[in-house]
Amino acid sequence: MKYKALITRALPDAAQQKLSEVFDLVINPHDRALTHDEIILQIADCDALICLLTDTIDKAVIDAAPRLKAICNYAVGYNNIDVEYATAKGIVVCNTPGVLTESTADLAWALLMSAARRIVEGDQMMRRGEFPGWEPLMLLGNDVWGKTIGIIGMGRIGQAMARRAGGFGMKVLYSGSAAKALDFPATYCDLDSLLQQSDFISIHAPLTVQTRHMIGTPQFEQMKDTAVLINTARGAIINEAELVLALQNKTISAAGLDVYEREPALAQGLAALPNVVLAPHIGSASIDTRTRMAIMTAENAIAVILGQEPIARVN
Ligand code: DGY
């Protein structure tokens, strides 16, 4: 008898094929996310759940699936899952670390360069037919090379971000729970020092009770007024309404965001600001990376069901 798995949104074919060798698959037929109620309805007799970072996997979902053995998130972040409750129920929770590290760091750098050098404002000017020709004071931005970058959270993606900074001759500061043995030059410091000394600040921490709103008005007030803030981690690490004020008042110079506090909604006023570059949560969105993530998610689910150790478990 085959096991049964619910896939809350269609994945790349290679992963679904792998899963179908072990599972009868229930795949969301819609080109939209399943609602919480739909997940509860579909999961009743499933042994594994393959879900997205946008699915809230809480007690209600877990209680609706008495046979559930594995919750496999198609993401490295897993703040959407009640891991504590899953653990209490003996359910293994898996994620996809490592395979999206470089793509996410690439995207963070794309945002950093775009925000610093005002690429989006320039693009809009060109498309509107408003380029007046070369001008001495047009669209002056911030230099990147030789500046100081502060990395909040020196995990895999933070390190990939910092390595790229070496190519721009930047000084790297980082904060987090402890100093790390790194194979590139970087200085560990407390968050306050990082905020005060950095020209660019890039967030690479997980969203937890401790990191929710760790960046808000008091932190913006410590930053340089030329600082550029980048977030490709989770939106709720920043108080987004307070970021809007900081950008409006020029408390900081600019921001580049891939993630938002209440996705897909944006804080009021954010989209009207010229000094923010907005990407639609695409840090891992390359064909290769999303395929690698999907295969890892499938392999995690299969391993748990077959009683083997998955590639990446979080509990
Ligand atoms: C993740 O994996 O957590 C990213 O936010 C999406 O790939």
Image (cartoon, rainbow, N blue to C red):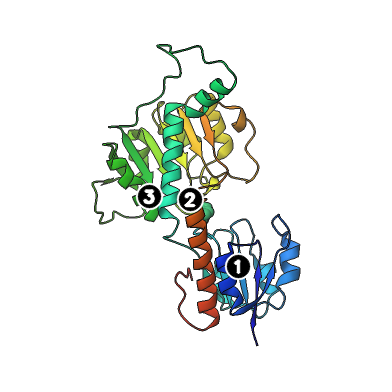
Query: At numbered mark 3, what does the secondary structure look like: helix, strand or loop?
Result: helix
Q: Amino acid at mark 2?
A: Thr
Image x and y of residue 100, in percent: 45, 56
What residue is drawn where x is 23% and y is 46%? 185
Q: Residues within 10 Å of mark 2 (few under 14, many from 20)?
A: some
In the rendered image, which residue does mark 1 sit on? 50
Q: Quadrant of residue 269?
A: top right
Kind of residue at disc 3: Gly
Residue 107 falls in image quadrant? top left
Between the residue at mark 2 and the residue at mark 1, the CA separation in whole angstroms equals 26 Å
Residue at mark 3: 158
Q: Tag 3 or tag 1, which sits nearer the N-term?
A: 1
Say whether residue 182 is left or right of residue 270: left
Q: Are marks 3 and 2 in contact (CB under 8 Å)?
A: no
Q: Nearer the viewer, mark 2 or mark 1?
A: 1
Q: Is residue 82 visible?
A: no
**Which of labels 1 and 3 is toward the front?**
1
**Residue 4 appears at what percent x and percent y?**
66, 78
Q: Amino acid at mark 1?
A: Ile
Q: Up-down: is 145 above or below 259?
A: above
